[in-house]
Amino acid sequence: SLVIRGEKDEQAVLCSKDKTYDMKIADTSNMLLFIPGCKTPEQLNEDPKSCNIIHSQIAGFSNNYWELRRCRPKLKKLRKLLMEDPYEGPDRCKDQTLTFSRYTTEDLLSLIQASEEEILHQLQVIDACKIEGYWRILEFDYEMKLLNHVTQLIDSESWSLSKVPLRTCLEELGSLEPREMIEHILLSYGRRYVDDGEVYFEMHEDKICRAVAQMLLQNAVKFNLSEFQEVWQQSVPEGMTTRLDQLEGLALVDKSSRPETISLLKVEDLPEDNQERFNSLFSIREKWTEVDITPYIRDLCTEKQTVGALLTKYARCSMLNGVKVYNSRRPIS
Amino acid sequence: SGGAGALARWVLVELQGEVEPRQGGELPGSLLGDLHYTCEGIPVLIVGHHILYGKVVQLEKPFAVLVKQGGAPQPSPGGPQGHYTVTALIKTKLLFKTRPKPIITHVPKKV
């Protein structure tokens, strides 16, 4: 079945089980008549005997109709809603009080302009978890606290990063944090598998390094790049290697400044609308190389619009010191 | 609801301009005209004393006909607040876009 979703201030979308479509009213100057009983020449040829006079009624007529066009699901709102009340852990008194900023699956289905499958998939992507029936996002500091418990345990037990046992984690850390949270952090930062009847996790090195970088970067506007890289490598768990490409869509390196700097820029903080996204990027930096801008527009791509197509449409290309760069098509105030 | 095979198939007739009822009449209940097909399958529509030639078009994007069911008197906060049921599919249209030709029944003799 199909569902039309949208609040009064939003443009309506139509959702199937797994796809989202923009809805537009299309006008025509022609008159469209709908005729239920009308037969086509093929149908009449099949049954020559029926070719007497057939009385058909025109059911109705119209000058307009709804046109559907497949679109990206509008999921930015999902994160926004869940960030209204991030989960800070069981110790915080805040969690005991009932607030209205908590959302069940049903609530999200009526507020988010996307299909059910797209919504559930996005909840997984942003590492949301269900606590007492409500979908919650972890507050970043609490998430790092949980991750630290796990990485310190991995270190003290000298486990391989690709074979972290669930059972021992729950035993050792269960007194510090809720078991569901320990399992949730392992699921968020690792790949679950079963070996010989026991559950293990293969930790995502890139994702852990990325989280540590975010923790370091969010404390200042800008960092000296080489200093940052040194501190970053020292801060990640033993055995992990940091690489700048792990920070795509999270941080931006400024190679034109002396010394080179790095700052936090999260793609999920940027506008969802294509034109607004490009306006925002060009107000942050006047000229972008394709390599630098791609992580910040990749999520705008659809089947029909690739990164290249987006750049052609929303940016103007020029050469700077022998390198192809993109800037805004219009003056940015 | 129901498989695609269970849905009725309707046909769309597309006319240029507007259709007006005869003087003093209303559209509902009035006769539009007669539809014929030639041996080659070309649709011919006779409206009043005009004749229109059209063509059968298979729609690249089919239409679905939705009928609104009465809304719940008290819409529930979490649930949908209106239902549309897909009643029929339209995959074919008869497009009449050539100018209607008057049917002349009395041709004056040459003098």
Image (spheres, rainbow, N blue to C red):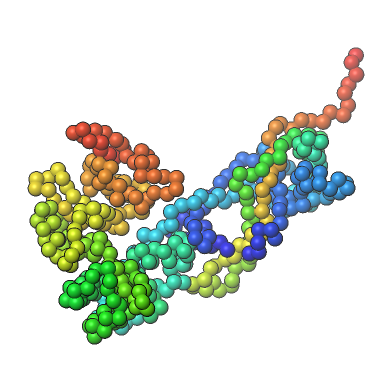
Q: Nearer the viewer, residue A278 or B70?
A: A278
Considering every residue shown, the one lying at the far bottom of the view is A175
Q: Quadrant of residue A240?
A: bottom left
Q: How far across and down, in percent of the image, does residue A317 sit? A: 29, 35
Residue A278 at what x, y percent from top left? 31, 46
Q: Residue furthest top?
A: B111
Q: Quadrant of residue A125?
A: bottom left
Q: Would you say A139 lies left or right of B42 here?
A: left
Q: Residue at x 26, y 84 (%)?
A: A171
Residue A181 visible within the image: no
Q: Is residue A99 left or right of residue B69?
A: left
Taking the image as shown, residue A166 lies to the left or right of residue A256, namely: right
Q: Residue at x 44, y 61 (%)?
A: A118
Q: Looking at the figure, which quarter contains the N terminus of chain A?
A: bottom right
Q: Nearer the viewer, residue A152 or A158?
A: A158
For residue A102, which quarter of the picture? Answer: bottom left
Q: Could you tell me if residue A97 is visible in this image? A: yes
Instruction: Please give the name of the residue rendered at 25% of the width and 36% of the height, measured from the top-left corner.
Output: A324
Taking the spot 24% from the left edge, 68% from the top edge, the residue there is A161
> Outermost residue toward the front?
A196
| Rendered view: A100 above or below A11 | below
In front: A165, or A195? A195
